[in-house]
């Protein structure tokens, strides 16, 4: 029988799998089954994960910093603590990546981009990256609706024997005048009910020195300047509250989230302009709930609901360019019902029905004020027999818009996933999948004044993947985990911005693009446990990841001039080679963590000519930590040095990144 004691302590290993939909609520489930449920083979296509100690010790400030260590991921980072940070998976574009927060998708109908820099790691327990989709029948229809997904699972309360309250406070300070305090309070309210409240404040001046230079095609230096980045300040407040409940046959969760920030937009360094004056204010609020109940052994119901309110103001007071003071308001309502029925112990079927309503208001001239109703229906089945596991799904998406000149859209997209374990008793599998998916044009794509195009078609992706995985970890002194995937993606009707008329200052959204993406993702991890005989055991681990990608733009066959054409060129900002390495050693109460990230040569345009060339860059980060105990009080002191070699580089052209920087972190748990 499940009780709050098991929920908050003894069953801590089981809950993450339940929350992610990878186990079934079963009143007779025993701890002995946990290892089977959490086994990687439980997923048709295993995900990449960062959790627990591995996530805590990374030199990462936000979720965007942490996901850089996944293979197949590219980050667009505009620099500094407050700079916009978005994620692209396997070169398909940011809008094809779904981001889920405690099982419910984060939305942005205005531009489709989720700024992962807004989400702190202080309250995150696990980050999981899924290519294709999550290997589960019992999930919302939205879970089937992206080419790839990132799942952020927040911390669940856990209490020691006899405890009813946990309190954790963390203070960070460092370069760029960073001040970052946070606090977490967890309370056991009763048998089966727990609560949590998390608050965080971030301040940074965003001022950091950088070196900026440009090399001309003939090899001479056009300029070489050292300056200080200006107008990159940020002030933000994040508040989160949660209620968690668990009974014999059901579990539920209610969560609220509030984020308020003001930041400067430092802008690109062009035409010898080193300082900008643009400002941006963001205020986001959502409340969401989830309920799951098992009825007997055959049927399980999951219900999700959400309301979100997002406000953004952008100000450009520079009248020498164009004075702009725009305000936007987004609202979203979402409801989902997912159903799973077990026909046989090895065969499940599921039906998910979702409804979502989005609206956008703005103070733009001649704005359309769009309203969008989206209905989704997903039919899925999963079979696990002998050493074979298969999942198939069909997603229907029906979009109805209330806007001048809008057109309703209806699409059906299938997916098939297969996994085979060739050796009984060994953690090895061979897997493959095919998925067709699309993304709707955003409100900005369709309706932004003088830019949007109401005739845009959805952007489609065909995904093909084949790979294998081997693991020999468990309780061994030496553990090994290796995975590799080869993939091929086709992106059609790609939505791009093109010049409108003769003026390069006016743009319009069009369906022009066709992109083919071929790639290989490889990652491995080795873990060594030592010192057991002395009673002072330690752990050393090394994790490596590498990605090769050939992402080519075949949009316009007529543009095949090798000197300046884009046909067949590597698409913008996608390197052919990139990788990372993370080494960690923990002994007694001390640990040290080293990380390395490499991004190869790129071009900032599909025209792969010398003028558009961007050099490779790499960074080294190092952190050390010490845990001190005073009875039940735990104090952890950490120090970080990021970009040890003081490399000056751009992730995005003309947006210089910080050089060497430091952080000191004090964390107290009571």
Image (cartoon, rainbow, N blue to C red):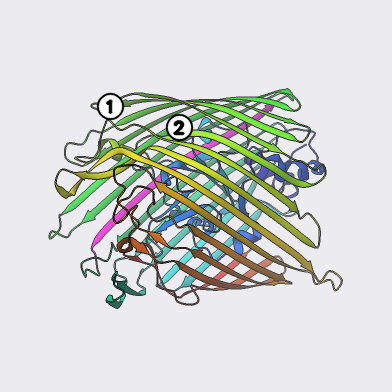
Residue 59, how many percent across, how many down? 54, 66
| Mark 1 Cα shell of 10 Å, populated few (<14), some (14-19), many (≥20) | some
Q: Nearer the viewer, residue 352 or 560?
A: 560
- Side (left or right) of 104 relative to 591: left
Q: Is residue 348 above or below residue 631?
A: above
Which quadrant of the structure image shows residue 622?
bottom right
* Rendered location of residue 341, percent (x, y): 67, 23
**Between marks 2 and 1 in the image, the one whose residue lies nearer the viewer:** 1
Mark on residue 334?
2
Q: Are marks 2 and 1 in contact (CB under 8 Å)?
A: no
Instruction: Give the CA distance from mark 2 to mark 1.
Output: 22 Å
**Image quadrant for the N terminus?**
top right
Query: Which residue is identified by label 1?
Result: 406
Q: Is residue 344 above or below residue 52?
A: above
Asked if one can make out residue 60 in the rendered structure from this viewpoint, the answer is yes
Residue at the spot x=58%, y=41% of the render? 465
Residue 448 lies in what quarter of the image?
top left
Residue 11: x, y in percent? 73, 46
Position above or below: 564 against 136: below
Front residue (pair 532, 215): 215
Q: What's drawn in magenta, residue-wise?
A: 275-294
Q: Position of residue 375 (x, y in %)?
A: 44, 25
Mark 1 residue element: loop
Taking the image as shown, residue 140 lies to the left or right of residue 425, namely: left
């Amino acid at each position: 029988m499940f009780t709050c004691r098991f929920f908050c302590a003894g069953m801590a290993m089981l809950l993450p799998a339940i929350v992610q939909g990878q186990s079934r609520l079963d009143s007779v489930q025993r701890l002995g089954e946990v290892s089977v449920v959490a086994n990687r083979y439980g997923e048709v296509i295993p995900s990449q994960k960062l959790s627990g100690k591995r996530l805590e010790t990374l030199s990462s400030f936000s979720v965007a910093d942490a996901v850089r260590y996944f293979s197949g991921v590219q980050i667009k980072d505009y620099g500094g603590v407050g700079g916009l940070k978005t994620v692209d998976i396997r070169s398909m574009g940011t809008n094809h990546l779904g981001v889920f927060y405690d099982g419910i998708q984060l939305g942005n109908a205005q531009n489709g981009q989720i700024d992962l820099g807004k989400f702190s790691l202080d309250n995150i327990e696990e980050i999981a990256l899924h290519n294709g989709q999550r290997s589960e029948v019992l999930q919302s229809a939205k879970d089937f609706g992206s080419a790839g997904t990132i799942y952020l699972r927040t911390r669940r309360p856990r209490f020691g024997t006899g405890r009813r309250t946990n309190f954790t406070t963390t203070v960070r300070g460092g370069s760029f005048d960073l001040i970052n305090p946070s606090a977490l309070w967890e309370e056991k309210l009763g048998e089966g009910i727990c609560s949590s409240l998390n608050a965080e404040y971030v301040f940074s001046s965003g001022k950091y020195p950088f070196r900026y230079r440009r090399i001309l095609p003939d090899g001479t230096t056009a300029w070489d300047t050292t300056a200080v980045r200006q107008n990159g300040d940020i002030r933000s407040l994040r508040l989160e509250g949660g209620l968690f409940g668990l009974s014999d046959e059901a579990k539920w969760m209610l969560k609220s989230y509030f984020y308020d920030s003001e930041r400067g937009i430092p802008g690109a360094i062009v035409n010898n302009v080193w300082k900008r004056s643009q400002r941006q204010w963001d205020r986001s609020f959502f409340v969401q709930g989830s309920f799951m109940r098992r009825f007997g052994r055959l049927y399980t119901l999951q219900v999700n609901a959400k309301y979100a309110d997002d406000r953004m103001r952008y100000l450009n007071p520079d009248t020498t360019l164009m004075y702009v003071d725009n305000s936007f308001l987004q609202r979203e309502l979402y409801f989902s019902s997912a159903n799973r029925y077990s026909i046989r112990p090895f065969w499940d079927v599921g039906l998910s029905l979702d409804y979502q309503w989005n609206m956008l208001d703005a103070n733009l001239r001649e704005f359309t004020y769009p309203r969008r109703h989206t209905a989704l229906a997903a039919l899925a089945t999963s079979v696990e027999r002998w050493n074979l596991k298969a999942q198939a799904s069909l997603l229907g998406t029906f979009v109805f818009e209330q806007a001048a000149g809008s057109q309703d859209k209806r699409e059906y997209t299938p997916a098939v996933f297969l996994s085979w374990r060739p050796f009984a008793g060994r953690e090895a599998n061979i897997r493959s999948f095919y998925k067709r998916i699309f993304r709707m044009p955003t409100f900005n794509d369709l309706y932004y004044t003088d830019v949007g195009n109401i005739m845009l078609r959805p952007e489609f992706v065909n995904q093909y993947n084949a790979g294998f995985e081997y693991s020999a970890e468990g309780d061994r002194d030496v553990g090994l985990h290796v995975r590799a995937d080869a993939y091929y993606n086709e992106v059609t009707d790609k939505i791009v911005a093109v010049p409108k008329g003769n003026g390069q200052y006016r743009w319009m959204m069009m369906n022009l693009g066709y992109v083919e993406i071929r790639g290989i993702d490889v990652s491995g991890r080795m873990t060594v446990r030592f010192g057991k005989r002395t009673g002072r055991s330690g752990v050393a681990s090394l994790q490596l990841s590498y990605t090769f990608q050939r992402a080519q733009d075949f949009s316009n066959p007529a543009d095949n001039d090798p000197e300046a054409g884009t046909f067949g060129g590597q698409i913008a900002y996608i390197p052919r080679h990139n990788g990372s390495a993370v080494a960690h050693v923990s002994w007694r109460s001390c640990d040290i963590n080293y990380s390395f990230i490499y991004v190869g040569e790129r071009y900032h345009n599909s025209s792969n000519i010398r003028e558009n060339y961007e050099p490779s860059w790499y960074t080294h980060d190092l952190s050390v930590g010490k845990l001190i105990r005073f009875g039940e009080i735990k104090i952890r002191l950490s120090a970080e040095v990021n970009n040890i070699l003081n490399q000056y580089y751009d992730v995005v052209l003309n947006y210089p990144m910080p050089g060497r920087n430091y952080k000191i972190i004090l964390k107290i748990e009571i």
